[in-house]
Amino acid sequence: MTEFEDQSGDRSKSSAFRRLPPVHAVMARPELAEAIEAKGREVVVAAIRAVLEEARTAIALGHDSTALEGEDAIIRRVVDRLDQDRPVLRSVINATGVLLHTGLGRAPLAIEASEAVARVASGYSNLEFDLDQGTRGKRSSGVSALLRRLTGAEAAAVVNNNAGATMIALRALANGREVIVSRGQLVEIGGSYRLPEVFESSGARLREVGTTNKTRLSDYERAIGPETAAILRVHPSNYKIVGFTESVGIADLAKLGRSKGLLTIDDIGSGALGPDRPPGIVGEPTVEEAIAAGVDLVLCSGDKLLGGPQCGLLIGSAEVVRRIERDPMMRALRVDKMTLAALETTLRLAIDPEKASRSIPLWRSLSVPVEQLSGRADRLADRLRQMLGLSVSSEPSQAYLGGGSAPDEAIASACVRIDPPLPGRELGATEASRALRMGAPSVVCRVQQGSLWFDLRAVPEHDDEAIFRAIEAVVRG
Ligand SMILES: *Cc1c(COP(=O)(O)O)cnc(C)c1O
C-alpha cells in the first residue's frame, strides 16, 4: 500500500485522507459478508485496497474527492468492483418456466457429466489415443459405441451442433445435387438457423415439394429425377401446422427412398434417445423409431431432450456415416474432449431410465409433481410477504420445454407472482427484473402484465432460498 505524503500542507487534503476508513473496518461491513464467503477474504481485501488507493490518488491530485470518502462511499465502490470481477458468462437461476431456454444455455448437465468434464479438462486424456494398442485412436469411439447400443444403428458421429450435422450431411451426401423437402418443413430455429440458408452454404440444392399445409407421397415421387440425392424430413420443432393438413410419415419416405435408390435423412431436432422419454414427453420423434423405420441417417441435438452438452448427433448406416466422416468439413466441426466427456456420461445415464430420472436435471425438473411445486411457491410467497412486506401470491402456471421442442405442450407448474412496486426502493417490474438479473446470483424471471413471475419448474428446490435472498437484496437495495 502506498501512502501519499501530504506535502502541500493543505489541511483539507489531510482531513480527506483521515476520512478514508481502514481496511479492517470496511471488511467488517455486512454488505461484504457474501462476497467474502463466495470469493474469499484475499480477493475482497485486494478490492478494498485498490479502491482506497484510487481514493488516495484522487485526494493527492487535488481532485474533488468528497464523493470517494467515507465508509459508505468506499463500500459502494468495493461492491461495484467485485461485481465487475464477476465472469461475463455466469450461472443464473432460470425462473422463466422455459426448461430448454436457448438464451440460458439449454439443458443443464448432470453432476456426473460435469464431473467427467472437469476430470478430462484439467489433465491429459486418451482423446485420440488407443490405450490398448498404444496407437492413434478415434476421438468419438466411446460415444459412437454408446449411440449404436442406444439406437440400434450401425454407426454414429458427433459434431458441434445439429446445424453443423445438417450442414455436413448435406455437403457430404448431396453436394451439387438435389434434396427434396416438404414446404411444411422449411424451419427457422432461433433466427440464425434457416433451412434454406443451411442448404445454400452446404452446396446441396433444396427441392421444395407440396404446400405449407399438405404434402403427399406423390409430391415427393414426382420430384425425383436424375439430380436427386436424398429426401430430407425436418421435424417442425417450434411450430405446428394444424387444421387441413397432411404429411408423409418417415416409414413411407424411407420406403420410397429405398425403392428409388435415394438416401433418406431425418432431422428429428430434439433427439429423444434411449429406452425411455423424459417424464411427460409424448409425441416427440425418437432416434430409434427413425432407425427402425429404415432411414439412412438421423440428425439431432445433444442439448435438448437428451439433456447433454451442445452437440449434433449423426446416427445411421455405416456407409453413410463413413462418407460424412471422410468430409474435410468434419475437422472444422469436430467436438472437443469436454463435450465428449459430458456426452459419454449423459449417454451412459440415458441407458438406464432409473438413473436418467435421478441424474439428468431436465428429467428431474419434469418429474416433480405439480403439487410439490405449488407447495414451494406457497412457502416462498409467505416468506416474501412476511419478511419483506411484498405484495405477492402463489399461482398455478404453465411451463414449456422450449429450445425448439414441443411448442404447444404446456407443462403444469407453479409460480410466485410479485406485484410491484417493490417496497423500499419502489422499483417497478422492469427495473426490479433488471436488478434481479444483475444480482448475485442472477435470477431470470418473467415480466407479464406488469408483474414479476417466478416459475419453479426449472428451479431446483435448493435454489428457492437463493431466489428469496436475491429478492431480499433487491428490496433492501
Ligand atoms: C434445434 C433444431 C436444430 C438446430 O439444432 P442446434 O443443435 O441448435 O444447432 C435443427 N433442426 C431442428 C429440427 C431443430 O429442432
Image (cartoon, rainbow, N blue to C red):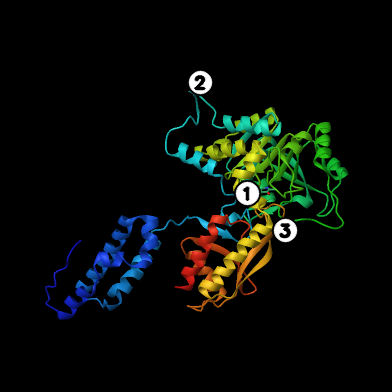
Horizontal side of 112 relative to 154 (left or right) equals left
Mark 3 lies on a secondary structure that is: loop
- How many other residues sit within 10 Å of disc 1, few (<14), some (14-19) or many (≥20)? some
In the image, which disc is placed on residue 410?
3
The residue indicated by pointer 1 is 364
For residue 344, what is the image quadrant? top right
Position of 318 relative to 91 (above/below): above
In the image, which disc is placed on residue 276?
none
Q: State the residue at coordinates (57%, 76%).
A: 420
Q: Is residue 161 visible?
A: no
Q: State the residue at coordinates (49%, 65%).
A: 470
Choose between 197 and 76: the one closer to the eye.
76
Amino acid found under the numbered disc labelled 1: Arg
Q: Nearer the viewer, mark 3 or mark 1?
A: 1
Position of 78 relative to 165 (above/below): below
- Real-space Cα separation, disc 3 to disc 2, in angstroms: 49 Å
User: Does the beta carbon at disc 3 come under 8 Å from ligand 1?
Assistant: no
- How many other residues sit within 10 Å of disc 3, few (<14), some (14-19) or many (≥20)? few
Say which label, 2 or 1, has the lower sequence index: 2
The residue indicated by pointer 2 is 132
Say which label, 3 or 1, has the lower sequence index: 1
Amino acid found under the numbered disc labelled 3: Ala
- Real-space Cα separation, disc 2 to disc 1, in angstroms: 37 Å
| Residue 92 percent across, percent down from the top left | 52, 58
Q: Is residue 115 visible?
A: yes
- Real-space Cα separation, disc 3 to disc 1, in angstroms: 17 Å
For residue 213, what is the image quadrant? bottom right
Amino acid found under the numbered disc labelled 2: Asp
Assess whether mark 2 and mark 3 are in contact (beta carbons under 8 angstroms).
no
Mark 1 lies on a secondary structure that is: helix
